[in-house]
Image: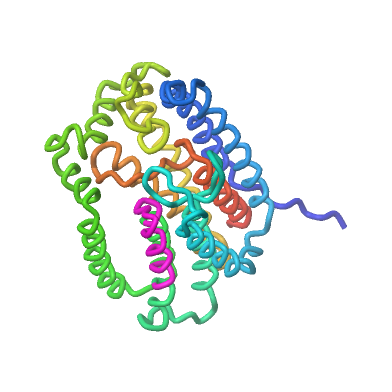
Amino acid sequence: MKQSRPPSPDLWLFACIIGLLAIGIVMVYSAGAVLAFREYGDSYYFVKRQLLFAGLGLAAMWFTASIDYRVWRKYAKPLLLICFVMLVAVLIPGIGVVRGGARSWLGIGSFGIQPSEFMKLGMILFLASWLSRPGYPIKSFLHGLLPPLGLAGLAFGIIMLQPDLGTGTVMMGASMIIIFTAGASLKHLGFLGLGGIAGFAALVAAAPYRLKRITAFLDPWSDPLGAGYQIIQSLYAIGPGGLAGLGLGMSRQKYSYVPEPQTDFIFSILAEELGFIGGLTVILLFFILVWRGMRTALTIPDTFGSLLAVGIVGMVAVQVVINIGVVIGLMPVTGITLPLISYGGSSLTLMLTALGILLNLSRFAR
């Protein structure tokens, strides 16, 4: 008997991933060429490394897209344990590497991995597995809601010791989306939300640089050469872009005005060079990606697959909203990259790995 051909993944989803990745590679070169030449004497330094990361990420995406998503349920617990071990190892002097004022890397020289990025996916896999168990008492605060929330809170606390508020916020955001989707009580989540706001205020007050970011967000011109510098320069980039932009490669703000233009603020350079049309195109591609991912979550036949799809889509959506919100001045600066667009090794590779799982999930959507 002839074996039936396995269903194909969602082609809309795949096209959005490849489109965003291609735009990202072009923009990493355009936005980072000046800084790369100044720092390393090679205008292609960032884009060459991005191509390497993209190749590794695409290989990982092909691998995870080829594996039945139900296999991950078996390995969710050991994978989360490995992520916790790496997070703790980062904090040990001599093992963890300090970059940009945060001890959040493991590696040698310029090559390294960021365990907090791995934790985002590890937590999503584990929570999807845990909360999809038959008869799980999610409506109970003590026995249903508190254990998964406490686990995510523990991971967030370790990440904050590095410190890395941006990655921790994305992980907690994706975790809360999974917990909400699993059926947690809105009353319980509301009370926890108030506690979370109080905790966030305490974190901000505990670190003077975070408090400066909040005040700069409210009035960047109160400190235009200090805490408000990044957002002011970002808006100076976006404004002149107009409808069609200044042209690819023609940004003025990448000449040592916008800090790290190839990472956190790459969207501002994209808007300057490609204008409103270019920025809207990227946002629409992310919108389609989220829409197709949620369609998969709604139509897949089992709870584990549904929660896993929701978690991956939630991770992407939270990260996109925060990054673009920061760049256009709607949120305080947090240091979060734009998925598939910004320069980065661990973030790009792990994002493509997670999206590979989502592609596999889409094979089973009705």
Query: Which residues make up the magenta segment?
Result: 150-168
Q: In which quarter of the image is the C terminus?
A: bottom right
For the question of whether residue 310 can be seen, the reply is: no
Q: Quadrant of the N terminus?
A: bottom right
Residue 138 appears left or right of 65:
left
The residue at the point 28 percent across, 71 percent down is 192
Residue 312, percent from left and from top: 49, 55
Most common SS among magenta residues: helix
The residue at the point 47 percent across, 29 percent down is 28
Q: Which residue lies furthest to the front in this view?
A: 94
Which of the 4 quarters of the picture holds residue 229?
A: top left
Q: Which residue lies furthest to the left in this view?
A: 222
For the question of whether residue 323 can be seen, the reply is: yes
**Magenta includes 166?**
yes
Q: Looking at this view, is 164 or 239 the one in front?
A: 164
Residue 29, percent from left and from top: 48, 25
The residue at the point 50 percent across, 48 percent down is 292
The residue at the point 49 percent across, 45 percent down is 347
Question: In the picture shown, does residue 169 fall above or below 326?
Answer: below
Q: Which residue lies furthest to the right in this view?
A: 1
Residue 226, percent from left and from top: 20, 36
Question: In the picture shown, does residue 120 fall above or below 291?
Answer: below
Q: Looking at this view, is 172 or 290 the one in front?
A: 172
**Magenta includes 157?**
yes
Residue 135 appears left or right of 58:
left
Residue 175, percent from left and from top: 42, 63
